[in-house]
């Protein structure tokens, strides 16, 4: 069992169905991690088949994305950074153009499809620690209300797409470390930490 980046802990999860596997991931997110650490999630099948956790979840993602994911070099995990714990995926992909097109087309339903992994803050009145928010003057508004949507943003010299809620809080961030490595994370802090670990892992190879 290997990981795309350096990880601090590893946890085996299981589930006979995609729903059970999703619940196992959600439960792992609730188990405390030390600050600035990452927990690799894996299944028994991950070491013996070409099925990644991302693929095993059977998400309603476009086929152009799913067909281009290399399970052996992809990973799922939980990260604690900026005072918050969240899920993330690092996906090794065959085609940048096909997977990016797939992600763009998925944006219409992605927040809903990934709500269990990247939930909204509907029950929170204030911005949680570690989740970035923007001034309302920097986000298009209608009648002084921020319109939730994906928008382009550069993070550590990498182009990304960020979906923020009506309060300007990060819900989903995705982007590419290189032409064959796609990151899906919760917020800017998580995305930045993963970028750094990818760069370190690449340097040490």
Image (cartoon, rainbow, N blue to C red):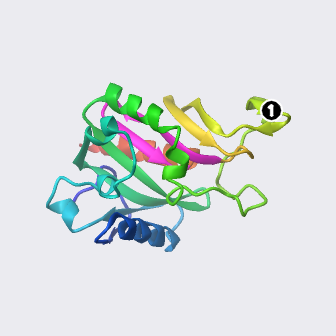
Residue at horizontal 67 percent and vertical 40 percent from the top: 148
Residue at horizontal 45 percent and vertical 33 percent from the top: 105
Q: Quadrant of residue 181?
A: top left
Q: Is residue 20 above or below residue 73?
A: below
Asked if the stretch drawn in magenta spans residue 143, the answer is no
How far from the left and from the top, in percent, is residue 62?
37, 39
Asked if the stretch drawn in magenta spans residue 176, the answer is yes
How far from the left and from the top, in percent, is residue 164?
64, 43
Image quarter where the N terminus lies is bottom left
How far from the left and from the top, in percent, is residue 34?
51, 68
Q: What secondary structure predominates along the stretch shown in magenta? A: strand
Q: Is residue 30 above or below residue 148?
A: below
How far from the left and from the top, in percent, is residue 84?
59, 61
Residue closer to the observer: 146 or 32: 146
Q: Which residues are magenta?
A: 170-186
Q: Is residue 6 visible?
A: no
């Amino acid at each position: 069992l290997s990981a795309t980046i350096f990880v601090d802990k590893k946890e085996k999860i299981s589930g006979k169905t995609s729903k059970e596997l999703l619940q196992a991931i959600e439960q792992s997110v609730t188990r405390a991690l030390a600050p600035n650490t990452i927990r690799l999630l894996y299944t028994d099948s991950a070491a013996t088949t070409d099925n990644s956790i991302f693929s095993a979840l059977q998400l309603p993602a476009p086929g152009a994305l799913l067909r281009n994911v290399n399970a052996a070099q992809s990973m799922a995990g939980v990260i604690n950074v900026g005072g918050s714990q969240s899920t993330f995926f690092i996906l090794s992909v065959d085609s940048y153009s096909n997977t990016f097109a797939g992600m763009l087309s998925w944006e219409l339903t992605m927040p809903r499809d990934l709500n269990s992994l990247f939930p909204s803050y509907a029950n929170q009145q204030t911005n949680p620690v570690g989740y970035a928010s923007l001034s309302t003057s920097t986000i298009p508004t209608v009648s002084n209300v921020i319109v939730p949507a994906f928008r382009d943003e550069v993070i550590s010299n990498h182009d990304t797409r960020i979906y923020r809620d009506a309060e300007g809080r990060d819900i989903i961030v995705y982007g590419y470390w290189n032409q064959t490595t796609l990151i899906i994370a919760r917020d800017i802090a998580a995305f930045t930490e993963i970028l750094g670990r990818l760069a370190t892992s690449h340097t040490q190879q």
